[in-house]
């Protein structure tokens, strides 16, 4: 597709369950980012993938969060044993190595 | 780690007046500085960017200036309109080609 695709667009889950969020970046974009955004807040950096380099995981808030990027394309963000404070919009963005990012429309996660 | 400071956090201006948002970064190797606009409930969108080989770039009512010596860059919006109301983020690319985000400025245009 022409843009960054994220799925699902909305996810409601029970506290303690695991969730997987998917990001399909723009074809050819080597960089991929995951961010988290709570209502009215700025972007909280989670993880950064750049080509075949080791990802920068410094933004992951706890060991319940992990992300993979398979084949340099699709990425999955996994949250284990979800907590209510995990509720937020999770945004994925991709870019060429030296360019601006294009964002997906996000996944709104609600933990009840 | 590298970071960027963005000011002010909230800016309220009268419709038709100008708005200026300022950012300061720390990585002297930075050479790419995009600005994003995020309207309520929507994803951030790139509005303008500048590379370090120029000091100023303009696109209609929006301009960005860069002072590499002082490590400052700014967004200027002239003749503000209601549709300019949004959160604006300054960003820079660090020496690892990673984009580093400011905390955002909420711009309110008063009618």
Image: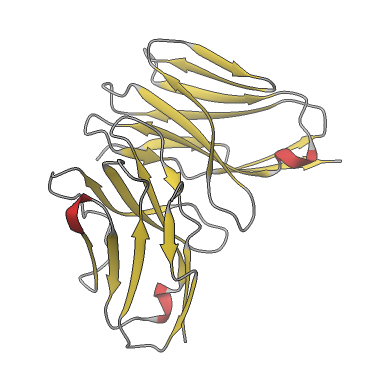
Which is more toward the observer, B76 or A3?
A3
Q: Position of residue A66 (x, y in %)?
A: 22, 67
Task: Work out whether B44 lies above or below A39.
Answer: above
The residue sitting at 37% across, 31% down in the picture is: A99
Check the image and name the residue furthest to the front. Answer: A1
Residue B20, quarter of the rendered image: top right
Front residue of B42 and A72: A72
Instruction: Return the residue found at the far right.
Output: B111
Which residue does the image show at 36% across and 12% down from the upper left?
B69
In the visual, does A96 lie left or right of B103? Answer: left
**Quadrant the N terminus of chain B occupies:** top left
| Left or right side of A30 for B51 | right
Residue sitting at 13 percent across and 45 percent down?
A52
Query: Residue A63 location, x and y as percent?
Result: 20, 70
For the residue pair B6 and A1, the one nearer the viewer reads as A1
List x then y, in percent, for residue A98.
31, 29
- Left/right placement of residue B94 relative to residue A9 reads left
Picture coordinates of residue A3, whole percent (x, y) = 46, 48
């Amino acid at each position: 597709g022409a843009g960054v695709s994220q799925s699902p667009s909305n996810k409601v889950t029970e506290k303690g369950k695991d969730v997987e969020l998917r990001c399909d970046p723009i074809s050819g974009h080597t960089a991929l980012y995951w961010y988290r955004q709570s209502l009215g807040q700025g972007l909280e950096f989670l993880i950064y993938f750049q080509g075949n380099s080791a990802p920068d995981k410094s933004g992951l808030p706890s060991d319940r969060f992990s992300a993979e990027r398979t084949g340099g394309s699709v990425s999955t963000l996994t949250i284990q044993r979800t907590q209510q404070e995990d509720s937020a919009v999770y945004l994925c963005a991709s870019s060429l190595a030296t360019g601006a990012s294009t964002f997906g429309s996000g996944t709104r996660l609600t933990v009840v | 780690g590298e970071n960027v400071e963005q000011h002010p956090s909230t800016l309220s201006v009268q419709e038709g007046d100008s708005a200026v948002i300022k950012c300061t970064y720390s990585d002297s190797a930075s050479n790419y500085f995009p600005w994003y606009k995020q309207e309520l409930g929507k994803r951030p969108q790139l509005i303008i960017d500048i590379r370090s080989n120029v000091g100023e770039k303009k696109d209609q009512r929006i301009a960005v200036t860069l002072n590499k010596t002082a490590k400052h860059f700014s967004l200027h919006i002239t003749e503000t309109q209601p549709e300019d109301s949004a959160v604006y983020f300054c960003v820079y690319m660090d020496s690892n080609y990673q984009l580093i985000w400011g905390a955002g400025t909420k711009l309110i245009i008063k009618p």
